[in-house]
Protein backbone atom coordinates (compact mmCIF):
# COMPACT_ATOMS: atom_id res chain seq x y z
CA UNK A 1 0.00 0.00 0.00
CA UNK A 2 2.79 2.37 0.87
CA UNK A 3 4.59 1.71 -2.41
CA UNK A 4 1.36 2.29 -4.34
CA UNK A 5 0.79 5.64 -2.64
CA UNK A 6 4.35 6.71 -3.39
CA UNK A 7 4.07 5.62 -7.03
CA UNK A 8 0.78 7.47 -7.45
CA UNK A 9 2.19 10.63 -5.92
CA UNK A 10 5.19 10.44 -8.22
CA UNK A 11 3.12 9.75 -11.35
CA UNK A 12 0.27 12.22 -10.82
CA UNK A 13 2.27 15.49 -11.05
CA UNK A 14 3.88 14.45 -14.34
CA UNK A 15 0.49 13.55 -15.77
CA UNK A 16 -1.19 16.70 -14.44
CA UNK A 17 1.46 19.02 -15.89
CA UNK A 18 0.87 17.87 -19.45
CA UNK A 19 -2.82 17.07 -19.25
CA UNK A 20 -5.41 18.54 -21.62
CA UNK A 21 -8.14 20.50 -19.86
CA UNK A 22 -10.26 18.21 -17.70
CA UNK A 23 -8.09 15.14 -18.20
CA UNK A 24 -6.37 15.05 -14.82
CA UNK A 25 -9.71 14.23 -13.19
CA UNK A 26 -9.58 10.85 -14.95
CA UNK A 27 -6.78 9.80 -12.60
CA UNK A 28 -9.16 9.89 -9.65
CA UNK A 29 -10.67 6.62 -10.87
CA UNK A 30 -8.36 5.37 -13.62
CA UNK A 31 -5.05 5.01 -11.79
CA UNK A 32 -1.98 5.21 -14.02
CA UNK A 33 -0.12 2.71 -11.83
CA UNK A 34 -2.62 0.10 -10.54
CA UNK A 35 -3.64 -2.63 -12.91
CA UNK A 36 -5.56 -4.53 -10.20
CA UNK A 37 -7.96 -1.70 -9.31
CA UNK A 38 -11.73 -2.15 -9.63
CA UNK A 39 -11.76 0.57 -12.29
CA UNK A 40 -9.10 -0.31 -14.86
CA UNK A 41 -6.11 1.76 -15.80
CA UNK A 42 -6.26 3.18 -19.31
CA UNK A 43 -2.50 3.38 -19.71
CA UNK A 44 -1.33 1.29 -22.64
CA UNK A 45 -4.73 1.03 -24.29
CA UNK A 46 -5.51 2.20 -27.80
CA UNK A 47 -6.30 5.93 -27.79
CA UNK A 48 -8.87 5.56 -30.59
CA UNK A 49 -10.71 2.89 -28.58
CA UNK A 50 -10.75 5.10 -25.46
CA UNK A 51 -12.07 8.05 -27.50
CA UNK A 52 -14.71 5.78 -29.05
CA UNK A 53 -15.78 4.60 -25.60
CA UNK A 54 -16.10 8.21 -24.44
CA UNK A 55 -18.23 8.94 -27.52
CA UNK A 56 -20.47 5.97 -26.72
CA UNK A 57 -20.82 7.13 -23.12
CA UNK A 58 -21.59 10.69 -24.28
CA UNK A 59 -24.24 9.48 -26.73
CA UNK A 60 -25.86 7.09 -24.23
CA UNK A 61 -24.95 4.01 -26.28
CA UNK A 62 -22.74 2.48 -23.61
CA UNK A 63 -24.05 1.58 -20.14
CA UNK A 64 -22.45 3.48 -17.30
CA UNK A 65 -22.86 4.59 -13.72
CA UNK A 66 -20.91 7.84 -13.96
CA UNK A 67 -18.97 7.96 -17.23
CA UNK A 68 -22.01 8.85 -19.32
CA UNK A 69 -22.43 12.05 -17.34
CA UNK A 70 -18.72 12.86 -17.29
CA UNK A 71 -18.25 12.25 -21.01
CA UNK A 72 -21.05 14.70 -21.88
CA UNK A 73 -18.80 17.48 -20.59
CA UNK A 74 -16.29 16.98 -23.40
CA UNK A 75 -16.41 17.58 -27.13
CA UNK A 76 -15.19 14.94 -29.56
CA UNK A 77 -11.90 16.82 -29.98
CA UNK A 78 -11.41 17.11 -26.21
CA UNK A 79 -12.18 13.41 -25.83
CA UNK A 80 -9.55 12.53 -28.41
CA UNK A 81 -6.94 14.72 -26.70
CA UNK A 82 -7.78 13.18 -23.31
CA UNK A 83 -7.60 9.68 -24.76
CA UNK A 84 -4.20 10.33 -26.33
CA UNK A 85 -2.92 11.69 -23.00
CA UNK A 86 -4.39 9.04 -20.66
CA UNK A 87 -3.11 5.99 -22.55
CA UNK A 88 0.58 6.97 -22.55
Image (cartoon, grey):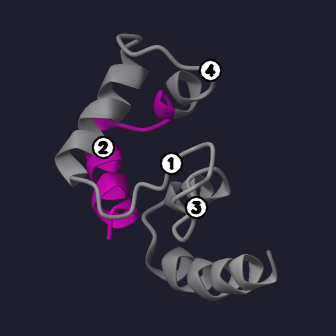
Residue 21: image location, x then y, percent = 48, 60
Disc 4: which residue = 65
Which mark is first along the chain, 3 or 4? 3
Q: Secondary structure at mark 3?
A: loop
Tell me if 83 is positioned left or right of 8 in this view: left
Residue 67 included in the magenta stretch of the image? no
Mark 1 element type: loop
For the residues bearing labels 1 and 4, Cβ distance under 8 angstroms: no
Residue pointed to by mark 1: 40
Left or right position of 76 against 12? left
Highlighted range, magenta? 71-88
The majority secondary structure of the magenta stretch comes to helix
Mark carried by residue 31 = 3
Badge 4 element: loop
Residue closest to the far right: 2
Name the residue rendered at 42%, 64% in the picture. Answer: 20
Q: Which mark is residue 50?
A: 2
Instruction: Say if 64 sits above or below 86 in the image.
Output: above
Q: Secondary structure at mark 2?
A: helix
The residue at the point 41 percent across, 23 percent down is 57
First in sequence: mark 1 vs mark 2: 1
- Of labels 1 and 4, earlier in sequence is 1
The residue lying at 32 percent from left, 22 percent from top is 56
Label 1 neighbourhood size at 10 Å, few (<14), some (14-19), many (20+)? some
Amino acid sequence: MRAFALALLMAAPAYAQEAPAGASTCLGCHSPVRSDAAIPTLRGRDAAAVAAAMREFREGRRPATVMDRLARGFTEEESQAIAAWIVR
